[in-house]
Image (tube, rainbow, N blue to C red):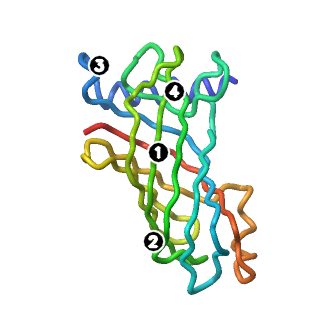
Amino acid sequence: MKTKALLMSALSMILLIVTGPQASAQVWTGACVLNVTFQFASPVRLTGTNPGYTISVTPAADLDPTWSGSQPCITSLDAFSPARATSVGADGSSTLWTCGSVLASGRWDQQWTDKSGNSSPPAVFGSHTIAGSWGDWILEVRNPSLNFVGVMPLTVHPSSASKVAQCSSGISSLTMTGVMEFQDP
C-alpha cells in the first residue's frame, strides 16, 4: 500500500514539475498504468496474418487506494486529487499482425472520471495505431483535431509470456502492459 502511495506521489510530482500549476486547465498532461488485451478475430501466427481485433483495457495499478475502484491514471488538472479512473472502447484492423511484427490501427475512445464522478479531463474520441515487434510495441492515440496525443510503450504481460511459444499453432488473444503518457498540446 505504501508503494502505491509513493508511486502516486512521484507521478504527481513529475506532472507538476513538467507542466507547472495549471491556472486555466486548458493545457494538461497525464499518465495511465494499464493492461491492454487484444482479442483477435482470427489467430495470429508466425507469418502471413492480419486479423481484426477488439481491445479491452484494465488498470495495472491503483494510484489512489483511498477511494473505491481502481484509479490507474493521474492528470495535471487537479494538484490535490490527480487520480482518475478510466474506461476505453477500442477495436481495429491490421495490415500485418504476426508473432514477429505488427502494424495496425483503429478506433480509440477513452474517458476519465475524477473522485466526484465528473468526467475530467475531456473524453477522447479518436484513433490508435500500434506498431513494433514482439515484446516491443508502441501504441499511439490521437483525436481528429490533433489536440490530444497519448503514447504507450507496451511489453508482454506476464499472463501472456508463454504465447510466443504457442505462435506456430496461433494465438487468439494477447495481453500487454505499459504506461500511457498523454497530453493536450
Viewer-nearest of discs 1 and 4: 4
Q: Nearer the viewer, residue 126 or 141?
A: 126
At label 4, the amino acid type is Arg
What is the distance, in whole Å, between disc 3 and disc 2 at their CAs?
Answer: 38 Å
Q: Compared with residue 87, is residue 20 higher up or lower down, i.e. above or below? A: above
For residue 103, which numbered disc appears in the image?
Answer: 2
Can you tell which of label 2 and label 1 is closer to the viewer? Answer: 2
> Does the CB distance between marks 3 and 2 fall below 8 Å?
no
Q: Which residue is mark 4?
A: 84
Residue 180, labelled with which disc? 1
Q: In the rendering, at what x and y percent does residue 45 appear?
A: 65, 80
Residue 172 rendering spot, x and y as whole percentages: 70, 68
Of labels 2 and 1, earlier in sequence is 2
Instruction: Verify CB contact (< 8 Å) between mark 1 and mark 4.
Output: no
Which residue carries the number 3 mark? Answer: 21
Q: Residues within 10 Å of mark 1 (few under 14, many from 20)?
A: many
Question: Where residue 135 sits: x, y (%)?
Answer: 58, 65
Quick one: 139 or 119, which is closer to the camera?
119
Name the mark nearer the viewer: 1 or 3.
Answer: 1
For marks 4 and 2 on the same chain, the one whose residue lies earlier in the sequence: 4
Select label 3 or label 2 by which is in front. Answer: 2
Give the residue type that dot 2 points to.
Answer: Leu
